[in-house]
């Protein structure tokens, strides 16, 4: 039996809908080159959104008969709630919120990869160039390794979300107990201020705050993202049951267009970074000083199963989610 939408998702649905600015999701409109199917897509305003912007600007969606309209939602769970209700046709989410939703029987289908890590990233000698997340301490901190975080205050943007899960894995793999970490919820800007004032002992940050912290003299203790996810897709474009039933052909066209844009972004990095700077409202120098985005050309079941198993091992899921046989579109 399908459960109702989780309370946490329902609580943020109203915010997601206000960001979308519309009631119905897909529609058909007459364009200069014929009818276009409109798809409403939720993004969260991060640098990797450059690929979907390129797909719009380069006309890749129009080639598929699509008019894609994006809106920034509050966070991935808000986007998932809107996709489940049919208010959005597709939305961005990392695999961790996807698995949390699947564990609550929210019916979602993975359409395409939005971002991730390349095979080359795993061999990089400078993880700040491939991982857009970072665990940072003050330069003179006695904390030398993840295990030392036991009993210490560590900031995260949200509880039981990506950075808490990935940092917990670091602590456990280093022989520590993540349940003994004092997690504090702070937005990245407040987390950096709290780190430098001594209010927290370590800060879990995302780009561009990681490079900003290092430029201010703080020390990078670890890069939790690439260590946790490995090579493959991390960010995903997903759709809800009702949109897939209603607009399957259009959503398949979205997948073709986004993969064309992903390939373009990987080979035209300067252009993609300029867009990332616009999207995140940061100077281009800050973008270039941080991690280089990577846009995969596929999503595999292994990309998601690996995260599923790790979340269960860490206790964030009671047991691994049994992944649906048709979780990924086209498989």
Image: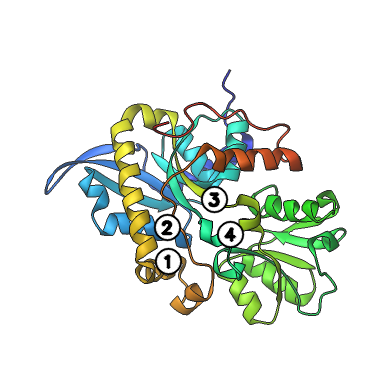
Classify residue 132 by image quadrant: bottom right
Q: Is residue 124 above or below residue 9?
A: below
Kindly identify which numbered label has been placed on residue 49: 2
Q: Circle 4 sits on which residue?
A: 122
Q: Label 3, secondary structure: give it.
A: loop
Q: Quadrant of the C terminus?
A: top left
Residue 53 is left or right of residue 176, and the answer is left
Tag 3 or tag 1, which sits nearer the N-term? 3
Q: Circle 3 sits on which residue?
A: 75
Kindly identify which numbered label has been placed on residue 136: none
Residue 275 at x, y = what percent?
38, 67
The answer to whether residue 157 shows anywhere in this view is no
Q: Label 2, secondary structure: give it.
A: helix
Q: CA distance from mark 4 to mark 1?
A: 23 Å
Contact, mark 1 vs mark 2 (Cβ under 8 Å): yes
Residue drawn at (47%, 39%) of the image: 82
Q: Is residue 248 above or below residue 209?
A: above
Q: Circle 1 sits on which residue?
A: 276
- Within 10 angstroms of label 2, few (less than 14), some, or many (20 or more) residues? many
Residue 175 is left or right of residue 136, and the answer is right
Contact, mark 4 vs mark 3 (Cβ under 8 Å): no
Tag 2 or tag 4, which sits nearer the N-term? 2
Considering depth in this image, is 16 or 279 the residue closer to the camera? 279
Contact, mark 1 vs mark 3 (Cβ under 8 Å): no
Q: Nearer the viewer, mark 4 or mark 3?
A: 4
Q: CA distance from mark 1 to mark 2?
A: 7 Å
- Within 10 angstroms of label 1, few (less than 14), some, or many (20 or more) residues? many
Contact, mark 3 vs mark 2 (Cβ under 8 Å): no
């Amino acid at each position: 039996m399908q459960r109702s939408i989780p309370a946490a998702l329902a609580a943020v649905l109203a915010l997601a809908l206000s960001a979308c600015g519309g009631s119905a999701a897909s529609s058909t409109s007459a364009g200069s080159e014929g009818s276009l199917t409109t798809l409403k897509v939720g993004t969260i305003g991060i640098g990797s959104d450059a690929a979907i912007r390129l797909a719009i600007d380069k006309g890749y969606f129009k080639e598929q008969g699509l008019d894609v309209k994006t809106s920034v939602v509050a966070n991935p769970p808000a986007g998932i709630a809107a996709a489940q209700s049919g208010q959005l046709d597709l939305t961005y989410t990392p695999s961790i919120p996807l698995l949390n939703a699947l564990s609550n029987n929210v019916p979602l289908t993975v359409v395409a990869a939005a971002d991730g890590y390349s095979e080359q990233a795993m061999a990089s000698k400078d993880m700040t160039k491939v991982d857009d997340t970072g665990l940072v301490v003050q330069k003179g901190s006695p904390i030398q390794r993840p295990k030392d975080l036991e009993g210490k205050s560590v900031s995260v943007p949200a509880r039981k979300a990506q950075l808490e899960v990935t940092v917990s894995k670091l602590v456990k793999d280093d022989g520590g107990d993540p349940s003994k970490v004092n997690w504090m919820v702070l937005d990245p800007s407040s987390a950096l201020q709290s780190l430098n004032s001594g209010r927290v002992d370590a800060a879990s940050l995302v780009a561009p705050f990681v490079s900003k912290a290092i430029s201010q003299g703080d020390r990078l203790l670890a890069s939790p993202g690439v260590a946790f996810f490995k090579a493959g897709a991390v960010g995903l474009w997903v759709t809800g049951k009702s949109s897939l039933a209603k607009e399957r052909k259009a959503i398949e066209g979205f997948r073709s267009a986004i993969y064309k844009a992903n390939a373009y972004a990987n080979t035209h990095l300067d252009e993609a970074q300029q867009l990332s700077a616009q999207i995140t409202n940061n100077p281009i120098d800050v973008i270039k000083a941080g991690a280089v985005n990577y846009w995969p050309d596929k999503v595999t079941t292994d990309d998601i199963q690996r995260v599923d198993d790790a979340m269960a091992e860490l206790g964030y899921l009671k047991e691994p989610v049994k992944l649906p046989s048709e979780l990924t579109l086209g498989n």
